[in-house]
Image: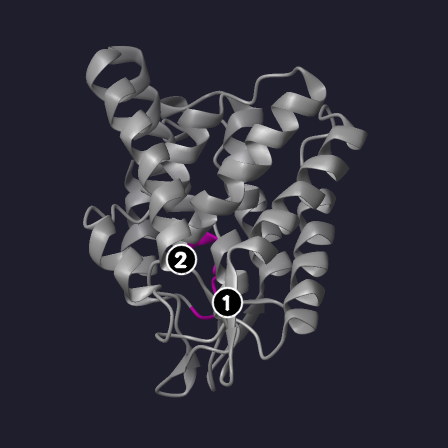
């Protein structure tokens, strides 16, 4: 079971969270908030992958609850590889850079260097063994396939997910404590994608408009997708913002 939230007070699996986020996205239809980004399939793709990085934090308990600092960096790592492999296998464009930008910045985390440093080897164990990691990756692939837009090529999706899992298995390191991510590989890959994002952001007014719109929409559905029974403090603020907007 992969969790998006887990504490003594509540728990929500990644699958449940994506489902609730997609429901929140649909519930916003016809609102002004949805009009800030109207490309439905791109938005759904961002929603499906926005918390993929949490698969690496399933052993990272802090003060009795799972903690996910910097997970958006690893979500971008996962999506970036998936998108590259999918586009290559299908000859279809996912508008990957825009989607990647929204995923990477959906919590408006500007200091990526510090967040990547925290992910470094020794800071947290992503699995006790490579076998455990492979099981997590297989479960994540099943969740993603369940929610991806129907228009996507199934064979290309399978290939892209397998290639993504292969990449992750190549950039991990094992120690007597367990399996860790290589911070160098994470930094190089995400850093290069981040450079492309900001080059396009500076160059294209339309990209700026769409990136800010999609990142805002993703932030809103992410917090609405936690569920009404156990909202966070900021989640209540986001809910009010969505209602007032």
- Quarter of the image for residue 90 reads top right
**Residue 2: x %, y % from top left:** 61, 67
Residue 175 versus residue 216 in the image, above or below: below
> Magenta part mainly helix, strand or loop?
loop
* Residue at x 36%, y 26% (from the top left corner): 32
Does the residue at mark 2 contact the one at mark 1 (Cβ under 8 Å)? no
Residue 227 shows up from this direction: no
Distance (Cα) linking label 2 and label 1: 18 Å
Q: Mark 2 points at which residue?
A: 71
**For the residues carrying marks 2 and 1, which lies nearer the camera in this image?**
1
Residue 45 seen in render: yes
Residues 108 and 154: in front is 154
Q: Residues within 10 Å of mark 2 (few under 14, many from 20)?
A: many
**Highlighted magenta segment, given as a residue range:** 223-230
N-term-proximal mark, 2 vs 1: 2
Report x, y in % for residue 149.
68, 31
Q: Does the magenta stretch include residue 227?
A: yes
């Amino acid at each position: 079971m992969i969790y998006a939230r887990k504490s003594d007070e509540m728990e929500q699996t990644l699958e449940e969270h994506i489902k609730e986020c997609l429901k929140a996205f649909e519930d916003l239809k016809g609102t002004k908030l949805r009009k800030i980004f109207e490309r439905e399939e791109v938005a759904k793709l961002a929603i499906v992958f926005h918390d993929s990085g949490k698969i690496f934090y399933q052993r990272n308990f802090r003060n009795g609850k799972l903690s996910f600092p910097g997970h958006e960096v690893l979500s971008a790592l996962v999506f970036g590889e998936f998108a590259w492999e999918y586009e290559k296998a299908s000859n279809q464009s996912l508008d990957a850079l825009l989607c990647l930008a929204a995923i990477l910045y959906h919590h408006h985390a500007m200091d990526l260097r510090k967040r990547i440093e925290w992910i470094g080897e020794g800071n947290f164990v992503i699995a006790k063994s490579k076998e455990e990691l492979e099981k997590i990756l297989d479960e994540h692939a099943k969740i993603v396939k369940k929610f991806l837009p129907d228009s996507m090529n199934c064979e290309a999706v399978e290939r892209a997910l397998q290639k993504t899992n292969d990449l992750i298995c190549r950039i991990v390191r094992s120690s007597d404590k367990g399996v860790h991510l290589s911070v160098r590989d994470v930094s190089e890959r995400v850093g290069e994608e981040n450079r492309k994002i900001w080059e396009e952001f500076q160059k294209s007014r339309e990209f700026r408009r769409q990136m800010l719109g999609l990142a805002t929409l993703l932030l809103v559905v992410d917090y609405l997708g936690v569920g009404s029974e156990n909202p966070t403090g900021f989640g209540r603020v986001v809910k009010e913002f969505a209602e007032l907007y």
